[in-house]
Structure formats: C-alpha cells, structure tokens
Amino acid sequence: MDDKFLSGLALAAISALTFVAYKHPSGYQKLSNPIMAITWVAWMGFLIWDMSIWITLKTLLPYIDSSKLNQAREAAATIEVISWKSAIGYLAFTAYMIFLSFMPNILDKQEPVEK
C-alpha cells in the first residue's frame, strides 16, 4: 500500500483515540485494553515471524553452498517484518496509549468535556 495512505490512516486513528480519551475518558478505558492487547499480540506475531526466519536460515546454513551465503542472508533480510523504525513506532504507540489512559488524572476530569 501507499505509505502516505497508511500514514494518514495511522494519524486519523491516533487522533480519534486522543479525542475519545479527552472527551470520554470512561469510554477510552473500555477501548484501550483491547487495543493494547491486539497490538501486543500482533507485535509478538511479528517477533515470532522474524525469529523463525533467522532460525530457519541458521538451520539451513550447512546445506547452502558457501558462495551463496550472502545471497541467502540478503533473501532472509528481505522478508523481515520488524525493523528499528517499527520497534520505535510500537514503543511510541504504547507509551502514548498509556499517557492517554492517565489523561483524566492529569487534567482532573472524570466527566466528559462539554463545549
């Protein structure tokens, strides 16, 4: 997919979560745990995928011709899901979700904010 589309979709989702956390703190509390659980499960799936790639490569190395080792490593690297950018993104998203869960305490507001 287009990176601009995904970036816009992520920005819209984060903006919506921020709005809900500010205007409806009790509703956000109901949403935040399932969202955090889903993102954690997805992250664990990505970690398992990446670990399986490198474990498979390590297992197959004795059977790969020595002249093709670099090509095999490059091929394995092309199907990796997690990069340092995605790790930072996941950690930033988790930190922001936790920050939003504390927003009512920070603002001393328990009721929805009225215009």
Image (tube, grey):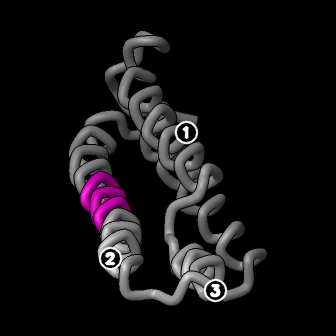
* 68 relative to 105, above or below: below
Q: Is residue 32 left or right of residue 94?
A: left
Q: Which residues are magenta?
A: 39-48
Residue 31 in the image: state x and y as whole percent.
28, 50
Residue at 34 percent of width and 63 percent of height? 51
Which residue does the image show at 41% across and 77% down from the upper left? 61
Residue 55 % position (x, y):
32, 68
Q: Residue at 64% x, 77% y: name it.
A: 70
Which of 108/72 is in front?
72
Indicate the position of residue 42 as horizontal and vertical percent values.
Answer: 32, 64
Q: Nearer the viewer, mark 2 or mark 1?
A: 2
SS category of the residue bearing label 2? helix
Q: Within 10 angstroms of label 2, few (less than 14), some, or many (20 or more) residues?
A: few
Given residues 85 and 11, the one toward you in this image is 85
Q: Is residue 97 magenta?
A: no
Residue topped by disc 1: 92
Kind of residue sitting beneath label 2: Thr
Q: Dot 3, how many residues are within 10 Å of its Cα: few (below 14), some (14-19), or many (20+)?
A: few
Please tell me whether residue 31 is drawn above or below residue 98 in the rendered image: below
Q: Which image quarter is the N terminus in?
A: bottom right
Which labelled disc corresponds to residue 67? 3
Of callouts 3 and 1, the N-terminal one: 3
Q: Nearer the viewer, residue 76 or 50?
A: 76
Q: Amino acid at mark 1?
A: Ala
**Cα–Cα gap, marks 2 and 3:** 19 Å
Q: Amino acid at mark 3?
A: Ser
* Displayed quadrant of residue 103: top left
Q: Which residue is mark 2?
A: 56
Circle 1: element type: helix
Marks 3/1: CA–CA distance: 41 Å
Q: Residue at x 44, y 46 (%)?
A: 20
